Image (cartoon, rainbow, N blue to C red):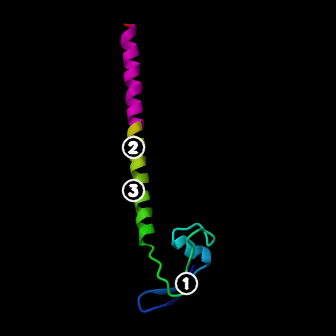
C-alpha cells in the first residue's frame, strides 16, 4: 500500500487486490468472499479489535506460563524436601 494523496477526511491510497483482501480479513484476492468495488468503504475496526484481543491473550498466556514455571520450581523443592524427610 502506498499513500498517494490526501482527502478531506484522510488519505488516498493505492493497494493491490491482495492488500485489499487482507484488509477485509481474507488471505488473498482468490479467497471466498473477496469483493471490492470503487467507492466501497472498508471497515477494518473489527480486525484491529481482534488483533488487540490476540495480543492481550498472548500476554495472559505469557503470565500463566511464568506462574506455571514458579509452580514447577516449588513442586521440585517440595519433592526434594519430602524425599529428604523420608530418608531420615
> In the displayed structure, would residue 35 be above or below residue 63?
below
User: What residue is at 36 percent from the left and 12 percent from the top?
Assistant: 85
Q: Nearer the viewer, residue 79 or 16?
A: 16
Q: Quadrant of residue 28?
A: bottom right
Image quadrant holding the N terminus, namely bottom right
Residue situated in front as seen by the camera: 65 or 50 = 50
Q: Which mark is residue 81?
A: none
Q: Residue 37, image x and y in percent?
A: 55, 84
Judged left or right of residue 18, residue 77 is left
Q: Are marks 1 and 3 in contact (CB under 8 Å)?
A: no
User: Between 27 and 6, which is closer to the camera in this rendering?
Assistant: 27
Look at mark 1 in the image and give the residue it sits on: 37
- The answer to whether residue 1 is above or below residue 87 is below
> Please, what is the dominant secondary structure of the magenta stretch?
helix
Q: CA distance from mark 3 to mark 2?
A: 12 Å
- Disc 1 and disc 3: Cα gap in Å? 34 Å
Assess disc 3: are there few (<14), some (14-19) or many (≥20) residues with their C-alpha within 10 Å of its C-alpha.
Answer: few
Q: Quickly name the residue at label 2.
A: 64
Give the residue number, with chain letter if any, for mark 3. 56
Q: Secondary structure at mark 3?
A: helix
Name the spot of residue 43 as percent of width and height, x first.
44, 76
Magenta-drawn segment: 69-87
Labels 3 and 2 touching (C-beta < 8 A): no
Residue 55 falls inside the magenta stretch:
no
Q: Position of residue 9 (x, y in %)?
A: 41, 88
Q: Residue at x 41, y 62 (%)?
A: 52
Circle 2 sits in a helix, a strand or a loop, which is it?
helix
The answer to which of marks 2 and 1 sits earlier in the sequence is 1
Alpha-carbon span between mark 2 and mark 1: 45 Å
SS at circle 1 = loop
Answer with mark 3 or mark 2, whichever residue precedes in sequence: 3
Image quadrant in which the C terminus is located: top left
Amino acid at each position: 500500500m502506498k499513500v498517494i494523496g490526501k482527502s478531506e477526511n484522510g488519505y488516498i491510497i493505492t493497494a493491490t487486490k491482495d492488500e485489499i483482501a487482507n484488509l477485509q480479513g481474507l488471505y488473498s484476492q482468490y479467497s471466498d468472499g473477496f469483493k471490492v468495488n470503487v467507492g466501497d468503504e472498508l471497515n477494518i475496526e473489527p480486525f484491529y479489535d481482534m488483533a488487540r484481543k490476540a495480543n492481550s491473550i498472548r500476554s495472559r498466556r505469557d503470565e500463566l506460563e511464568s506462574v506455571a514455571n514458579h509452580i514447577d520450581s516449588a513442586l521440585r523443592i517440595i519433592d526434594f524436601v519430602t524425599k529428604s524427610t523420608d530418608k531420615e
